[in-house]
Image (tube, rainbow, N blue to C red):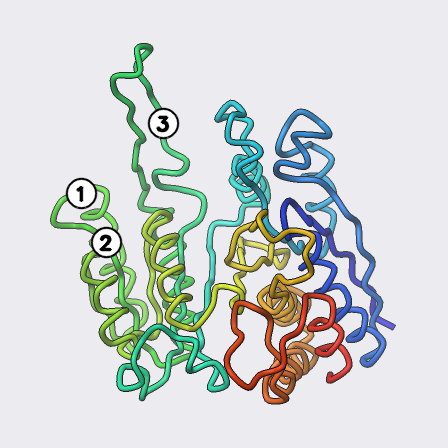
Amino acid sequence: MSEFNIALIKGDGIGPEIVDGAVTVLDAVGEKFGHKFNYKEVLMGGCAYDACGVPLPQETIDVCKASDSVLLGAVGGPKWDSVPSQLRPEKGLLGIRKALGLYSNLRPSILKPQLKEASPLKDEKLKNGLDVMVVRELTGGIYFGKREKAEDGSWASDEEKYSVEEIKRIAKIAFETAMLRNKKVVSVDKANVLESSRLWRATVTEMAKDYPQVELSHMYVDNAAMQLAINPAQFDVIVTSNIFGDILSDLSSAIAGSIGMLPSASLGATKCGMYEPIHGSAPDIAGMDIANPIATIVSAALMLDMSLGLHEEAKAINAAVDKVLDMGYRTADIMSEGMKKTGTKEMAALIAQNL
């Protein structure tokens, strides 16, 4: 029997419910395939601030570093809006990424045929399907730049800064990802305005010389947003900065029908990664058993595939998700006429049963 140590960061809002759903499925995987998953629950986000006075306790960092991988729910909520900025729940998320050296964020947006009606795009724009991988730089840029604010509150600034090495390592991830897909990379920037984007474009162009099989093109971020809405099938891999990737990956996920369906993987130089749904903590529906656990469940599948090397097990989870959708079960966010409405716990149980 293979054993794996997984750090669980359930977080805030619906986080505990959706992580529990993923654990239900992981336990079923363990039973079916002969693995044992050892879970260690740690605090991060608003719940950590409430319990410890900080959004990211040192114990959480230590446990995550000692684990084979990390599974995260979601953090934040209006409850902590008045907390000083350096102690807000989101600071925990930025901090754990930095502490674990997770500099790349992979966000796949795939439109499942069962959910085509849930996409806001018309059928003709989806006739060629949707399968986009957004590769987002995760530990640099404006989210980690110098912040300043006038004492009288009359102005504030945030610095966007990238080094050549930071750009090269995320570009390498994008090109190598494209080599496993359709060998197309679109690098998104704002090089007509920003000096940091001009460095980004020049560095990615230079990196492309090492991957002659990959077709590289460049796109300004405003045009990229428009093109995702007009013709999403033109994209294979998108590589971009932290803030642009944050925005574009949410757009691409909305096109896919629901942010409740899509996973993400945050990776660095080691096998240990952090896996989480792309959506937020949705405190307005917390505890109501209506949140969609599928994004967290398929994030767990990504974890099995990319960090733990359990490729068949990951495929089994994704196949079980498809089977349950084929059976007509839907949570509220993807509900449509004629389907069977279900809740968080039942959806997770159904997926576990159909492995």
137 lies left or right of 269: left
Q: Residues within 10 Å of mark 3 (few under 14, many from 20)?
A: few
Image coords of residue 114 (percent x, y): 50, 85
Give the residue at x 69% y 45%: 65
Residue type, numbered disc 1: Leu
Q: Sequence-wise, which precedes: disc 3 or disc 2?
A: 3
**Residue 317 badge:** none
Q: Quadrant of the C terminus?
A: bottom right
- Res. 306 in view: no
Image coords of residue 345 (percent x, y): 73, 67
User: Front-most of 107 and 176?
Assistant: 107
Do labels 2 and 1 touch, CB within 8 Å? yes
Q: Which residue is mark 1?
A: 194
Residue type, numbered disc 2: Asp
325 lies left or right of 201: right
Do labels 3 and 1 touch, CB within 8 Å? no
Where 131 falls versus 71 (above or below)?
below
Residue type, numbered disc 3: Lys
Q: Residues within 10 Å of mark 1 (few under 14, many from 20)?
A: few
Give the residue at x 25% y 62%: 225
Image coords of residue 9 (percent x, y): 68, 48
Where 321 falls versus 170 (above or below)?
below
Q: Sequence-wise, which precedes: disc 2 or disc 1?
A: 2
**Residue 146 badge:** 3
